[in-house]
Image (cartoon, grey):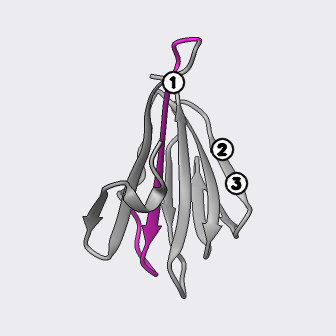
Amino acid sequence: PKPSGELPTHQNGANTSRAIRDGTTRSNDRLEVHETTLAPGSEPHPPHQHAHEELFLMRQGRLAVTISGKTTTIDPGGAAFVHSGELHGVKNPGPGPAQYFVVAIGT
């Protein structure tokens, strides 16, 4: 493993993401982890859905998480879980950067 500061980052405008892990568990389930920092008022992409499940873990700032039309705001230490197939999206309501981890499980 590398310290997070040594992992390459991907810049998308004022937003940054860093891949941490992409592999499989011992039971052969896919496990992908990344860290994202969103600028105030921004979102990483439009709402979407997919086969895998996702766990959002807040580190800094605030994140508005919309799942199946219901929006909840999570703060540092907060979490949100998205089931397979659920339409979801996230946005930083501001005023500062929002930093969070995504743990994706499944295909």
Disc 1 target residue: 106
Q: Considering depth in this image, is 23 or 91 the residue closer to the camera?
A: 23
Going from the N terminus, do you reach mark 1 or mark 2 first? 2
Residue 38, how many percent across, how many down? 44, 71
Q: Amino acid at mark 2?
A: Phe
Task: Say if the magenta span includes residue 30.
Answer: yes
Looking at the image, residue 58 sits to the left or right of residue 11; the answer is right
Sequence-earlier tag: 3 or 1: 3
Q: Is residue 101 above or below residue 98?
A: above
Is residue 42 placed above or below 10 in the rendered structure?
below
The secondary element bearing badge 3 is classed as strand
Alpha carbons under labels 2 and 3: distance apart: 7 Å
Residue at mark 2:
81
Q: Which residue is mark 3?
A: 79
Which element type, helix, strand or loop, lies under badge 2? strand
| Residue 44, percent from left and from top | 38, 61
Question: Are there few (<14), some (14-19), or many (20+) residues within 10 Å of tag 3?
Answer: some
Instruction: Specify the quadrant that holds the C terminus.
Output: top left
Please report contact status of discs 2 and 3: CB closer than 8 Å, yes or no. yes
- Density class for disc 2 (Cα within 10 Å; few <14, some 14-19, many ≥20) is some
